[in-house]
Image (cartoon, helix red, strand yellow):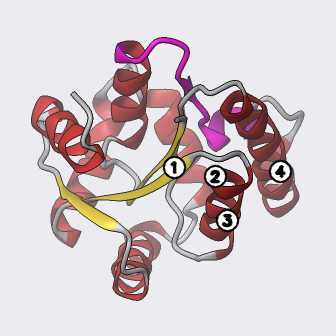
Amino acid sequence: MARLILLNGSPGMGKSTLARRYVADHPLALCMDVDDVRRLLGRWQELPQESGSLARRMALAMAAEHLRGSHDVVVPQYLGRVPFIEELERLAAATGSTFSELVLMDTRENALTRFHARSADPALASHHRDALALTTGGDGELREMYDRLVALVARRPRARVVPTSAGDPEAAYRAVLAELGTP
């Protein structure tokens, strides 16, 4: 049975890194990074709401096709609100797939530190710049995003928190696999 795995978490928690690692270890699994889809749209920065909505719809369509083919899909995305999570759940049910909602967490202050540390990593620089452009409220907005995520977890009993720490992606990956019950 195919899996639809949501890796939720604050910016800088390693969602994309862990999703790419899962895909590397699971043949034909798909990393459906909504932010990557958004970046494919012309002048997306000028229309952040519209481009985000369009990218989510496109990601759902791609994920549906992949799940129907009995292949896993991992969605690494910060989601502080419920509607897109519910769309992912419905998609999993409609395709006969399992749905796992994992939330990568660290302390709020560590989350801020990790987000800012990404700017020094050349491999993450463009991803970081895009995330920074979308968080125009600076650290205050990043704190609010973290707080929204904590509140969301409290309202979603099936969401499973995966503790993470900076500099140890292997431990986070093992914890994700353990939550999924996957070798």
Between tags 3 and 2, which lies in front?
A: 2
Mark sitting on residue 57: 4
Mark 4 vs mark 1, CA separation in Å: 20 Å
* Amino acid under disc 3: Phe
Does residue 154 sit above or below 76 in this rendering? below
Mark 1 vs mark 2, CA separation in Å: 6 Å
Secondary structure of the residue carrying numbered label 4: helix
Secondary structure of the residue carrying numbered label 1: strand
Whether residue 74 is visible, yes or no, is no
Secondary structure of the residue carrying numbered label 2: helix
Q: Residues within 10 Å of mark 3 (few under 14, many from 20)?
A: some
Residue drawn where x is 83% and y is 50% of the image = 57
The mark nearer the N terminus, 3 or 1, is: 3
Does residue 24 sit above or below 34 in this rendering? above
- Pointer 2 residue: 92
Residue drawn where x is 16% and y is 60% of the image = 110
Between tags 4 and 1, which lies in front?
A: 1
Secondary structure of the residue carrying numbered label 3: helix
> Is there a contact, CB below 8 Å, between mark 1 and mark 2?
yes
Bounds of the magenta segment: 25-39
